[in-house]
Image: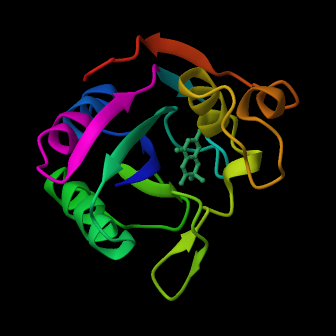
Amino acid sequence: MIECVIGLGANLNNPQQQLLDAAQHLLGEANITQFQLSSLYSSTPMGPQDQPDYVNGVAIFHTTLTPHALLDLLQHIEQLHGRVRSQHWGPRTLDLDLLFYGNKNINDARLTVPHPGILEREFVIVPLAELRPNYILPNNKSALSHANTLNLRELQLIHPGLPIN
Ligand code: ROI
């Protein structure tokens, strides 16, 4: 069993519901246990500003899936929710990013883990710090101490977390 952290994001078609549906899907997977979902936060877009605000959260769970099998599952769930891969850094109905896979480092054509953008993304670090304040990040700081160094921009809690099982 490996403990994984994923980031969830959406900014189209009722984004909060997209995230809750994705969480329900993951929760129902036979190869996933101990699933926890953070609170959901609204956040202003990083990157191009001519798009709606995002809803973001983080999920932590245990899995027996390999990293690539988990990536396949995440992409399958994105497809089910009608993800349109249009422009780079553009709006999307559902984005599921594999942030951490245990303490493994992965670098290949499909996967970079830990996810390279994590430290700059308050919409990832704050929900992670909520679930695991002592989670050690790639800069060797805890999630909570790193969260306290970030500009929180417009991050706002909009939905409480689900202590699912
Ligand atoms: N901005 C925010 N706030 N949240 C995201 O999930 C997000 N995802 C993206 C880009 C376009 C980088 N901006 C984002 O892919």
Across and down, in percent, residue 49 comes to 64, 43
Horizontal side of 87 relative to 113 (left or right) equals left
Across and down, in percent, residue 142 comes to 77, 35
Residue 15, quarter of the rendered image: top left
Is residue 116 depicted above or below 31 in this figure?
below
Horizontal side of 45 relative to 10 (left or right) equals right
Residue drawn 66% across the image and 45% down it: 46
Q: Foreground residue, 95 or 132?
A: 132
Marks counted in the figure total 0
Residue drawn 64% across the image and 51% down it: 48
Most extreme residue toward the right is: 149
Residue 76, quarter of the rendered image: bottom left
Asked if residue 55 can be seen in this view, the reply is yes
Q: Is residue 26 magenta?
A: yes
Across and down, in percent, residue 91 comes to 44, 50
Most extreme residue toward the front is: 1
Residue range of the region highlighted in magenta in the rendering: 23-39
Asked if residue 44 can be seen in this view, the reply is no
Q: Is residue 60 magenta?
A: no
Across and down, in percent, residue 132 comes to 59, 28
Residue 103, quarter of the rendered image: bottom right
Residue drawn 58% across the image and 21% down it: 130
Is residue 116 depicted above or below 109 in this figure?
above
Quadrant housing the C terminus: top left
Residue drawn 69% across the image and 43% down it: 121
Horizontal side of 27 relative to 52 (left or right) equals left
Most extreme residue toward the bottom is: 109
